[in-house]
DNA sequence: ACCCCAAACCTGTCTATACAACTAGTCTAG
DNA sequence: CTAGACTAGTTGTATAGACAGGTTTGGGGT
């Protein structure tokens, strides 16, 4: 009766929106292999008829698949499963803890210093603070499965998280504490990466020889309104770390 | 009569969709400073009344602004201009030529080798080719304002661009030729960056000493259906190059 | 002075419908 | 056999209206 794909029945009483249920069902079809790369997704009309929803609702589900990069639409032809596999969500701000867990490694942290201090020049500029404004300063060594990966130096305006010094255990996840204790949710970050050589002090902490290649990251994290919330400078072992990026070549410019 | 922002009148006979005209008008207000960071964009209802379009059309315009990252919506409150400045489109696949021109530098290229060859193991895997399939192999040194920036080694399946060896001048832009001569448009790339040290041979070509820090990039470029079209391995001077990234922390996971 | 509730306002979701524009294939007239 | 017209299928754009669910504000009662 229907085309190749049979969609899951909808739960009309659920709090989960219909378009989201449809999206989930389609994603499951892609994941399971029922819908393969390059194959056509059920058309808006077919989804609409099969599930008894309006075409606009079906359309919304399909649109969200395209936004994810899982599919692409061609006018007059249909919507097709993109050939690109998403092993993980690219270009996500992940805390070290989250990143290691995603890869199945056991994250560990050794705090070097955890204090309230005046903002240094770099941090003050990145966070739009005056020089005498207080920040939480946190220096840590990060380990994966007991071997050192990198050094991190975070600075967070004290104004955003009063009492942090007492409430936070510097061996645990910073982002989780910010979210749970202060309702601070980081949604965006600008990061620059440079390649450099380990200094003697860095080498000692990272258990590599001086002059070994390292990544130098500088990251500014923002809240949803664009307010800067964290400035991080970090040094990572190049033999244990690499940067993975997905780049798009968009036709949609946003000015003129 | 209306709120703070007066929108441009619509041209109902234009081929440009209404929602796109509205989007353009709102973007112009942001660009000109009429709408500042954190300020509220006219509500769907107001746009709808002011321009005489349906609410869904106004909504579509606002949605597209949010997709661009220029604004964010909050249920029950409104839609607000994001505080984040987009100096440039982040995370775009740019050719070396385009990238240098964007920064106001003069790109120059010295070809080292430009041949048809059997796919090497790395390229064959990345491009999903058999080992005996022919590829265009192109090695170049890239300069900005006469000083060397990096080495690139591109491989492209010959099947995609027959006659490339005769048609392409290896001192010019590869992507431009692919687009103009063959209608090949790269829309996506996966890139990994590692940090390493320059070998003696690399040092000679890049005019740095052996052991200097360098970036090692590996890039696979894809066409819109997900077919891989180019495999590039490149080495860039770390003192002249850094990676800039914008990361998001999305709440929309795409499996379960 | 304080608290609670209603009203106003906003975005999120959903329906039903219409027409435009594009694709791919079929049929027909020459 | 070919060029062109036609058709069925698909996405793109647009309208009008409805209700749900969240935020903010201000008024009224205690």
Image (spheres, coloured by chain):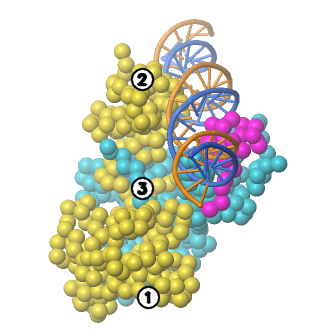
Chain colours: A cyan, B yellow, C blue, D orange
Q: Is residue B128 depicted above or below B6 in this figure?
A: below
- Identify the element where label 3 is drawn: loop
Residue B117 numbered mark, or none: 1
Residue at the image point whose x is 24% and y is 90% from the top: B204
Instruction: Tell which of B167 and B54 is nearer to you.
Output: B167
- Identify the element where label 2 is drawn: helix
Q: From the viewer's perspective, is A104 left or right of A222?
A: right
**Residue A12 is covered by the magenta coloring:** no
Q: Is residue A66 depicted above or below B157 in this figure?
A: above
Instruction: Tell which of B124 and A120 is nearer to you.
Output: B124
Nearer the observer: mark 1 or 3; the answer is: 1
Instruction: Tell which of B215 and A182 is nearer to you.
Output: B215
- Residue carrying label 3: A250
Residue at the image point whose x is 54% and y is 88% from the top: B131
Q: Taking the image as drawn, is residue B146 in sight? A: yes
- Whichever of callouts 2 and 1 sits on the residue coming sooner in the sequence is 2
Residue B51 numbered mark, or none: 2
The picture places residue B161, in percent across and down from the top left corner, at 43, 74
Q: Taking the image as drawn, is residue A236 in sight? A: no
Same chain for mark 2 and mark 3? The answer is no
The secondary structure that dominates the magenta segment is: helix
Residue at the image point whose x is 71% and y is 58% from the top: A29
């Amino acid at each position: 009766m229907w085309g190749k794909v049979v969609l899951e029945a909808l739960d009309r009483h659920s709090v989960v929106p219909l378009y989201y249920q449809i999206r989930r069902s389609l994603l499951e079809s892609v994941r399971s292999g029922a819908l393969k790369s390059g194959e056509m997704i059920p058309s808006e009309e077919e989804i609409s008829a099969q599930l008894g929803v309006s075409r606009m609702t079906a359309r919304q589900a399909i649109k969200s698949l395209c936004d994810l990069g899982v599919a692409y639409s061609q006018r007059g032809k249909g919507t097709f499963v993109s050939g690109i596999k998403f092993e993980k969500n690219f270009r996500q701000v992940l805390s070290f803890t989250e990143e290691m867990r995603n890869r199945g490694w056991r994250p560990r942290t050794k705090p070097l210093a955890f204090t309230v201090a005046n903002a240094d020049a770099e941090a003050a500029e990145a966070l739009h603070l005056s020089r005498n404004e207080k920040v939480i300063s946190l220096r840590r060594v990060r380990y994966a499965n007991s071997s050192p990966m990198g050094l991190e130096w975070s600075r967070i305006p004290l104004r955003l998280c009063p009492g942090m010094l007492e409430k936070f255990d510097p061996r645990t996840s910073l982002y989780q504490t910010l979210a749970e204790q202060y309702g601070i949710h980081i949604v965006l970050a600008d990061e620059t990466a440079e390649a450099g050589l380990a200094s003697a002090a860095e080498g000692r902490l990272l258990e590599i020889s001086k002059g070994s290649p390292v990544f130098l990251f500088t990251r500014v994290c923002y809240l949803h309104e664009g307010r800067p919330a964290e400035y991080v400078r970090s040094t990572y072992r190049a033999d244990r770390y690499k940067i993975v990026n997905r780049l798009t070549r968009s036709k949609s410019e946003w000015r003129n």
